[in-house]
Amino acid sequence: MISANNVTLAYGKRVLFDEVNISFTKGNCYGVIGANGAGKSTFIKILSGEIEPNKGTVTISPGERLAMLRQDHFEFDQVSVLHTVMMGHKKMWDLMIEKDAIYLKEDFTEADGMKAGELEHDFGEMGGYTAESDAAQLLNELGVKEEMHQQLMNDIPANIKVRGITGAGLVWQPGYFITG
Ligand SMILES: Nc1ncnc2c1ncn2[C@@H]1O[C@H](COP(=O)(O)OP(=O)(O)OP(=O)(O)O)[C@@H](O)[C@H]1O
Ligand SMILES: [Mg+2]
Protein backbone atom coordinates (compact mmCIF):
# COMPACT_ATOMS: atom_id res chain seq x y z
CA MET A 1 0.00 0.00 0.00
CA ILE A 2 1.10 3.56 -0.73
CA SER A 3 -0.24 6.26 1.57
CA ALA A 4 0.00 10.01 1.41
CA ASN A 5 -0.46 11.48 4.86
CA ASN A 6 -1.32 15.16 5.27
CA VAL A 7 0.62 16.03 2.13
CA THR A 8 0.82 19.77 1.57
CA LEU A 9 2.68 21.53 -1.24
CA ALA A 10 2.62 25.10 -2.48
CA TYR A 11 4.71 26.84 -5.14
CA GLY A 12 4.80 30.39 -3.85
CA LYS A 13 1.21 31.41 -3.29
CA ARG A 14 -0.14 28.62 -5.48
CA VAL A 15 -1.31 25.85 -3.19
CA LEU A 16 -1.34 22.56 -5.10
CA PHE A 17 -2.10 20.24 -2.20
CA ASP A 18 -3.47 21.00 1.22
CA GLU A 19 -3.40 18.16 3.74
CA VAL A 20 -4.04 15.37 1.24
CA ASN A 21 -4.73 11.94 2.73
CA ILE A 22 -5.12 9.02 0.38
CA SER A 23 -4.21 5.33 0.26
CA PHE A 24 -3.59 3.23 -2.83
CA THR A 25 -4.28 -0.40 -2.16
CA LYS A 26 -3.24 -3.63 -3.82
CA GLY A 27 -5.26 -4.95 -6.74
CA ASN A 28 -6.67 -1.61 -7.84
CA CYS A 29 -5.74 0.60 -10.76
CA TYR A 30 -5.90 4.33 -10.10
CA GLY A 31 -6.08 7.29 -12.42
CA VAL A 32 -5.39 10.87 -11.44
CA ILE A 33 -7.65 13.29 -13.29
CA GLY A 34 -7.35 17.06 -13.40
CA ALA A 35 -6.97 20.10 -15.66
CA ASN A 36 -3.59 20.97 -17.17
CA GLY A 37 -1.39 22.35 -14.44
CA ALA A 38 -3.61 21.02 -11.67
CA GLY A 39 -0.71 19.11 -10.13
CA LYS A 40 -1.06 15.51 -11.36
CA SER A 41 2.61 15.06 -12.29
CA THR A 42 3.70 16.87 -9.15
CA PHE A 43 1.64 14.48 -7.04
CA ILE A 44 3.23 11.45 -8.73
CA LYS A 45 6.66 13.00 -8.10
CA ILE A 46 5.77 13.40 -4.42
CA LEU A 47 4.69 9.75 -4.26
CA SER A 48 7.97 8.65 -5.85
CA GLY A 49 10.03 10.77 -3.48
CA GLU A 50 11.45 12.98 -6.23
CA ILE A 51 9.81 16.03 -4.64
CA GLU A 52 9.54 16.58 -0.91
CA PRO A 53 6.19 17.99 0.20
CA ASN A 54 6.23 21.08 2.44
CA LYS A 55 4.40 19.04 5.02
CA GLY A 56 3.28 15.45 5.41
CA THR A 57 4.75 12.09 4.46
CA VAL A 58 4.47 9.28 1.94
CA THR A 59 4.76 5.70 3.10
CA ILE A 60 5.11 2.51 1.07
CA SER A 61 4.69 -0.90 2.69
CA PRO A 62 7.95 -2.78 3.22
CA GLY A 63 8.87 -5.06 0.31
CA GLU A 64 6.99 -3.01 -2.27
CA ARG A 65 8.54 -0.60 -4.67
CA LEU A 66 7.41 2.15 -6.95
CA ALA A 67 8.48 2.68 -10.55
CA MET A 68 7.79 5.82 -12.51
CA LEU A 69 7.64 6.59 -16.20
CA ARG A 70 7.86 10.26 -17.08
CA GLN A 71 5.34 12.27 -19.02
CA ASP A 72 7.84 13.38 -21.68
CA HIS A 73 6.93 11.17 -24.65
CA PHE A 74 10.02 12.20 -26.63
CA GLU A 75 12.50 11.24 -23.94
CA PHE A 76 12.55 7.64 -25.19
CA ASP A 77 12.45 8.29 -28.94
CA GLN A 78 15.74 6.50 -29.56
CA VAL A 79 14.93 3.61 -27.22
CA SER A 80 13.12 0.41 -28.16
CA VAL A 81 9.55 -0.05 -26.99
CA LEU A 82 10.51 -3.03 -24.82
CA HIS A 83 13.43 -1.24 -23.17
CA THR A 84 11.27 1.83 -22.52
CA VAL A 85 8.95 -0.28 -20.42
CA MET A 86 11.88 -1.94 -18.64
CA MET A 87 13.41 1.46 -17.88
CA GLY A 88 10.29 2.15 -15.81
CA HIS A 89 12.13 0.13 -13.15
CA LYS A 90 15.05 2.52 -12.94
CA LYS A 91 16.98 0.77 -10.17
CA MET A 92 16.93 -2.52 -12.05
CA TRP A 93 17.86 -0.85 -15.33
CA ASP A 94 20.79 1.08 -13.80
CA LEU A 95 22.05 -2.08 -12.16
CA MET A 96 21.91 -3.96 -15.45
CA ILE A 97 23.99 -1.24 -17.16
CA GLU A 98 26.49 -1.29 -14.27
CA LYS A 99 27.00 -5.05 -14.35
CA ASP A 100 27.16 -5.27 -18.14
CA ALA A 101 29.89 -2.60 -18.12
CA ILE A 102 31.93 -4.75 -15.73
CA TYR A 103 31.74 -7.77 -18.04
CA LEU A 104 32.95 -5.64 -20.95
CA LYS A 105 36.11 -4.61 -19.10
CA GLU A 106 39.30 -5.84 -20.77
CA ASP A 107 41.21 -6.09 -17.49
CA PHE A 108 38.55 -8.08 -15.62
CA THR A 109 39.98 -8.61 -12.11
CA GLU A 110 39.01 -10.86 -9.25
CA ALA A 111 37.46 -7.83 -7.51
CA ASP A 112 35.39 -7.18 -10.62
CA GLY A 113 34.19 -10.78 -10.44
CA MET A 114 33.11 -10.31 -6.82
CA LYS A 115 31.34 -7.06 -7.62
CA ALA A 116 29.59 -8.60 -10.62
CA GLY A 117 28.44 -11.47 -8.40
CA GLU A 118 26.91 -9.04 -5.91
CA LEU A 119 25.20 -7.11 -8.66
CA GLU A 120 23.84 -10.33 -10.21
CA HIS A 121 22.38 -11.24 -6.84
CA ASP A 122 20.66 -7.86 -6.41
CA PHE A 123 19.51 -7.96 -10.03
CA GLY A 124 17.87 -11.33 -9.43
CA GLU A 125 16.17 -10.10 -6.26
CA MET A 126 14.67 -7.21 -8.23
CA GLY A 127 13.18 -9.59 -10.77
CA GLY A 128 15.76 -8.56 -13.37
CA TYR A 129 15.92 -11.98 -15.03
CA THR A 130 12.23 -11.93 -15.88
CA ALA A 131 11.98 -8.17 -16.53
CA GLU A 132 12.19 -8.56 -20.30
CA SER A 133 9.48 -11.21 -20.51
CA ASP A 134 7.37 -9.32 -17.94
CA ALA A 135 7.64 -6.16 -20.04
CA ALA A 136 6.76 -8.10 -23.22
CA GLN A 137 3.73 -9.63 -21.55
CA LEU A 138 2.62 -6.23 -20.30
CA LEU A 139 2.85 -4.81 -23.82
CA ASN A 140 0.98 -7.77 -25.31
CA GLU A 141 -1.81 -7.30 -22.80
CA LEU A 142 -2.00 -3.65 -23.80
CA GLY A 143 -2.37 -4.66 -27.44
CA VAL A 144 1.15 -3.66 -28.51
CA LYS A 145 2.11 -6.53 -30.81
CA GLU A 146 5.35 -8.51 -30.51
CA GLU A 147 6.76 -7.20 -33.81
CA MET A 148 6.73 -3.66 -32.40
CA HIS A 149 8.61 -4.46 -29.22
CA GLN A 150 12.05 -4.04 -30.78
CA GLN A 151 11.13 -0.93 -32.75
CA LEU A 152 12.25 2.50 -31.61
CA MET A 153 9.63 4.60 -29.87
CA ASN A 154 10.13 7.19 -32.59
CA ASP A 155 9.09 4.69 -35.27
CA ILE A 156 5.82 3.41 -33.87
CA PRO A 157 2.46 5.01 -34.68
CA ALA A 158 1.48 7.77 -32.25
CA ASN A 159 -1.74 6.06 -31.20
CA ILE A 160 0.12 2.88 -30.22
CA LYS A 161 2.75 4.94 -28.46
CA VAL A 162 0.11 6.70 -26.40
CA ARG A 163 -2.03 3.61 -25.82
CA GLY A 164 0.81 1.22 -25.17
CA ILE A 165 3.43 3.30 -23.49
CA THR A 166 1.25 5.58 -21.48
CA GLY A 167 -0.61 2.44 -20.49
CA ALA A 168 2.64 0.75 -19.57
CA GLY A 169 3.62 3.92 -17.76
CA LEU A 170 0.41 3.77 -15.80
CA VAL A 171 1.06 0.19 -14.83
CA TRP A 172 4.63 0.83 -13.72
CA GLN A 173 3.94 4.30 -12.42
CA PRO A 174 1.32 4.66 -9.70
CA GLY A 175 0.67 0.93 -10.05
CA TYR A 176 3.81 0.35 -8.00
CA PHE A 177 4.56 -2.95 -9.68
CA ILE A 178 4.98 -5.25 -6.70
CA THR A 179 7.85 -7.69 -6.45
CA GLY A 180 8.36 -10.64 -4.14
N1 LIG B 1 9.34 23.45 -9.86
C1 LIG B 1 8.24 24.22 -9.94
N2 LIG B 1 8.24 25.48 -9.47
C2 LIG B 1 7.13 26.25 -9.52
N3 LIG B 1 5.96 25.84 -10.06
C3 LIG B 1 5.91 24.60 -10.54
C4 LIG B 1 7.04 23.72 -10.52
N4 LIG B 1 6.68 22.54 -11.07
C5 LIG B 1 5.38 22.67 -11.44
N5 LIG B 1 4.93 23.90 -11.12
C6 LIG B 1 3.58 24.39 -11.33
O1 LIG B 1 2.72 23.55 -10.58
C7 LIG B 1 1.52 23.32 -11.28
C8 LIG B 1 1.28 21.83 -11.44
O2 LIG B 1 2.15 21.27 -12.39
P1 LIG B 1 2.04 19.76 -12.87
O3 LIG B 1 3.11 19.56 -13.88
O4 LIG B 1 2.06 18.88 -11.67
O5 LIG B 1 0.59 19.72 -13.53
P2 LIG B 1 -0.16 18.53 -14.29
O6 LIG B 1 -1.48 18.37 -13.62
O7 LIG B 1 0.70 17.34 -14.38
O8 LIG B 1 -0.36 19.19 -15.72
P3 LIG B 1 -0.44 18.51 -17.18
O9 LIG B 1 -1.86 18.08 -17.36
O10 LIG B 1 -0.09 19.64 -18.10
O11 LIG B 1 0.53 17.38 -17.25
C9 LIG B 1 1.62 24.08 -12.60
O12 LIG B 1 0.96 25.32 -12.43
C10 LIG B 1 3.11 24.27 -12.76
O13 LIG B 1 3.37 25.44 -13.50
MG1 LIG C 1 1.52 16.30 -15.95
Image (tube, rainbow, N blue to C red):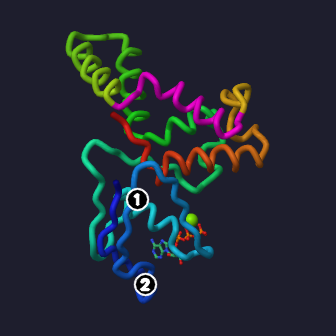
User: Residue 87's spot in the image, x, y percent?
Assistant: 50, 38
**Picture residue at 64% right of the left edge, 36% below the top:** 141
> In the picture, residue 4 is in which quadrant?
bottom left
Residue 122 is a magenta residue: no
Residue at the bottom extreme? 13
Front in this rendered view, residue 135 or 109: 135
Q: Amino acid at mark 2?
A: Val
Left or right: 15, with 1 as reference point? right
Q: Secondary structure at mark 2?
A: strand
Q: What residue is rendered at 77% in x and 48% in y?
A: 159
- Asked whether, in this view, residue 17 is left or right of residue 160, the answer is left
Nearer to me, 124 or 114? 124
The magenta region covers 126-144
Q: Which residue position is annotated with label 2?
A: 15
Image quadrant where residue 79 sits? top right
Taking 1 as reference, is 133 left or right? Answer: right
Q: Residues within 10 Å of mark 2 (few under 14, many from 20)?
A: few
Give coordinates of residue 106: x percent, y percent: 37, 11
Q: What x and y, as percent, mark residue 53?
A: 33, 71
User: Which residue was labeled with disc 1?
Assistant: 24
Q: Residue at x 29, y 24 (%)?
A: 119
**Mark 1 burial class by Cα count in 10 Å: few <14, some 14-19, many 20+:** some
Do callouts 2 and 1 mark residues in contact (Cβ within 8 Å)? no
Q: Quadrant of the N terminus?
A: bottom left
Q: Quadrant of the C terminus?
A: top left
Q: Determine the secondary structure under disc 1.
A: strand
Q: Position of residue 139 (x, y in %)?
A: 63, 35
Q: Is residue 16 above or below residue 175?
A: below
Residue at horizontal 53 percent and vertical 47 percent from the top: 171
Q: Amino acid at mark 1?
A: Phe
In this rendered view, identify the residue nearer to me: 94 or 126. Answer: 126
In space, the residues marked 2 and 1 are separated at their CA atoms by 23 Å
